[in-house]
């Protein structure tokens, strides 16, 4: 008879080999896990090698990953269960697109055992349960609507509008010259620069190209004439555009770019299914964009319109920049068509400022204590400096010995050239910077260049610089800022968009109160008895005229710079010959505000 102790011992021995039969993951699990790890790592070659259709799998895996462009992906194997035809695996997938944009979903795929072991049974649904043959996945931003841009009084300046781009594919056009002619006939009524020849020139490369982008109203005018032309397509988008064509173009273009950045920063995102033609057939995930805060600019509608009306009839390039001295707000930036054709001249153009720069020379001399407002100074018709260099007054007028205020009011070149020569080489650049000329700004919504003032490496160069010639250049923006600095008592920080901070590369010390208390009445005397008496009936205007030679010296730009109340301005007419047209233009501007 076998004892109970022996039976217990035998039972224990029998249990040992049973416990040792744990062989780890099954072959199905190894295959499924290997596929997912390679797929998540972006190794299409290794992942497709775990499937029963390596070529098709590799093509789709590479395309999906290329279309989605993830920062990183993660795949975790769930359960692997036996089925009648093999096995089924579930998994959890996440696509990380950066900046907290993560798309997660659950998927599954089948496995089958063949001659070479277990393989993933390939189908597009392996990538995502809803993906079918001929389809791929796409990732795109979901842009929120841009809120309108308003002026300082709340008037709407820019608003979202549907824009249509007329695009031509030369290879699909058939009779290319005929299609180009019909397009030119229709589109030339809106944009005269579009001709049959211009279209044919652009078609030379043979690739599809845009001809013009139209507002909805303009597209509606020509739709019936061009909608059925072969090779012509009309992709559309919604964008922020000026409510009034031509209004403050040079400013609003930059403001639009700032708003675009706000829209992009507030964008949502989505993942969708696309067919072979790139058409979206279904959304798999969507995170909507955040609302974009409205944008308000500092432009004053009545001041902007007055500036535009003043410059429009001038045949040469003409421009006005106006700044509010107390705040630095840009209230008007206006250019006529000849100026617009050359770019943003009002804000970045560099011109010799001529005698308007005598504000700086006068401020420097007053600051140094070399003269006072009533100091007697010489104003000969012409003056010889180093060597044979002779600098004249306009038409060599001669005032003799007069107070500084009189020399300033009548714009004596010989006086202010001598003042510059009598000061250190860095006196003019230093004084200019105190008024903002030479300071660089990063102002949201606008690119600006104030100007540059050289030190003057010779007596003659310093003499030229003293009257705004030589190595002195400035933009209308820079000169308007200088006038605003005189009116304000220190350089105001210029701004264009409310709530957006302007950065400056330096913070210059202001001129002394004693200097400004003398410079202001000197500028007032220019209007009362000097070179700008034409504007005398337009309020209490303080200013300085300027005639600035350029090129071979036979041509001159006309300037008038100054302020009235809390409005500083700079007016420039290129190649005007003298300053009088700029004074008259400024009068039209001020009388219209």
Image (cartoon, rainbow, N blue to C red):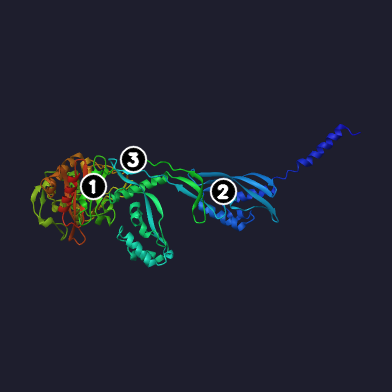
* Quarter placement of the C terminus: top left
Distance between mark 1 and mark 2 Cα atoms:
57 Å
What residue did someone put label 3 on?
499
Closer to the camera in the image, 409 or 255: 255
Distance between mark 3 and mark 1 Cα atoms:
24 Å
Q: Which callout, 2 or 3, points to the residue nearer the camera?
A: 2
109 left or right, relative to 343: right
* Quarter placement of the N terminus: top right
Residue 130 is labelled as 2
550 left or right, relative to 501: left
Q: Residues within 10 Å of mark 2 (few under 14, many from 20)?
A: few
Distance between mark 2 and mark 3 Cα atoms:
46 Å
Ranked by sequence position, the earlier of labels 2 and 3 is: 2
Looking at the image, the residue that sits furthest to the top is: 4
Closer to the camera in the image, 395 or 12: 12
Residue at position x 38%, y 45% in the image:
146
Secondary structure, mark 3, is loop
Residue at position x 33%, y 59% in the image:
187
Q: Residues within 10 Å of mark 1 (few under 14, many from 20)?
A: some
Q: Is residue 78 visible?
A: yes
Secondary structure, mark 1, is helix
Residue at position x 37%, y 41% in the image:
293
Q: Residues within 10 Å of mark 3 (few under 14, many from 20)?
A: few
Closer to the camera in the image, 338 or 163: 163
**Callout 2–callout 3 Cβ contact below 8 Å:** no
Tell me: residue 276, above or below residue 299.
below
Q: Position of residue 450 (x, y in %)?
A: 27, 50
What residue did someone put label 1 on?
305
Ranked by sequence position, the earlier of labels 3 and 1 is: 1
């Amino acid at each position: 008879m076998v004892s109970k102790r022996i039976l217990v011992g035998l039972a224990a021995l029998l249990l040992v080999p049973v416990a040792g039969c744990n062989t780890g993951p099954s072959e199905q699990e190894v295959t499924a896990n290997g596929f997912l790890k390679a797929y998540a790592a972006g190794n299409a070659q290794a992942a497709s090698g775990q499937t029963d259709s390596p070529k098709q799998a590799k093509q789709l895996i590479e395309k999906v990953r290329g279309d989605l462009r993830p920062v990183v992906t993660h795949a975790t194997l769930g359960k692997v269960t036996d089925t009648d035809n093999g096995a089924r695996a579930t998994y959890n997938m996440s696509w990380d697109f950066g900046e907290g944009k993560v798309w997660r979903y659950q998927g599954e795929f089948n496995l089958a055992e063949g001659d070479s072991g277990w393989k993933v049974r390939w189908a597009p649904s392996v990538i995502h349960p809803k993906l079918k043959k001929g389809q791929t996945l796409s990732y795109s931003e979901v842009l929120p609507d841009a809120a309108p841009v308003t002026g300082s009084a709340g008037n709407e300046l820019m608003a979202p509008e549907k824009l249509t781009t007329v695009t031509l594919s030369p290879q699909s056009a058939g009779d290319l010259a005929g299609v180009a002619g019909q397009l030119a006939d229709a589109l030339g009524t809106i944009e005269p620069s579009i001709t049959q020849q211009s279209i044919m020139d652009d078609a030379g490369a043979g690739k599809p190209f845009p001809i013009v982008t139209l507002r909805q109203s303009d597209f509606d005018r020509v739709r019936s004439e061009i909608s059925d032309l072969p090779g012509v397509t009309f992709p559309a988008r919604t964008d922020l555009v000026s409510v009034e064509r031509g209004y403050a173009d040079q400013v609003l273009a930059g403001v639009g770019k700032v708003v675009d950045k706000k829209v992009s920063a507030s964008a949502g995102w989505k993942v969708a299914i696309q067919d072979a033609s790139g058409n979206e057939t279904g959304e798999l995930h969507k995170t909507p964009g955040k609302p974009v805060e409205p944008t308000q600019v500092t432009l004053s509608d009545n001041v902007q319109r007055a500036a535009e009306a003043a410059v429009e009839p001038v045949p040469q390039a003409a421009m006005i920049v106006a700044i509010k001295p107390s705040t630095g707000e840009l209230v008007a930036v206006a250019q006529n068509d000849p100026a617009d054709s050359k770019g943003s001249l009002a804000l970045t153009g560099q011109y010799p400022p001529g005698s308007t720069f005598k504000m700086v020379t006068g401020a420097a001399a007053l600051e140094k204590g070399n003269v006072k407002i009533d100091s007697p100074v010489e104003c000969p018709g012409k003056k010889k400096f180093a060597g044979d260099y002779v600098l004249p007054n306009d038409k060599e007028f001669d005032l003799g010995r007069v107070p500084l205020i009189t020399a300033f009011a009548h714009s004596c070149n010989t006086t202010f050239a001598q003042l510059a020569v009598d000061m250190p080489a860095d006196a003019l650049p230093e004084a200019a910077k105190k008024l903002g000329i030479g300071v660089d700004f990063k102002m949201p919504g606008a690119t600006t260049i104030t100007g540059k003032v050289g030190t003057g490496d010779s007596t003659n160069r310093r003499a030229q610089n003293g009257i705004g010639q030589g190595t002195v250049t400035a933009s209308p923006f820079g000169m308007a800022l200088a006038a605003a600095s005189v009116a304000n008592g220190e350089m105001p920080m210029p701004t264009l968009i409310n709530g957006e901070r302007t950065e400056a590369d330096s913070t210059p010390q202001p001129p002394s109160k004693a200097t400004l208390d003398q410079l202001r009445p000197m500028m007032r005397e220019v209007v009362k008895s000097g070179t700008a008496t034409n504007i005398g009936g337009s309020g209490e205007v303080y200013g300085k005229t300027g005639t600035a030679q350029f090129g071979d010296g036979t041509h001159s730009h006309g300037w008038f710079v100054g302020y009235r109340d809390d409005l500083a301005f700079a007016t420039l007419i290129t190649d005007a010959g003298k300053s009088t047209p700029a004074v008259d233009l400024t009068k039209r501007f001020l009388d219209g505000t």
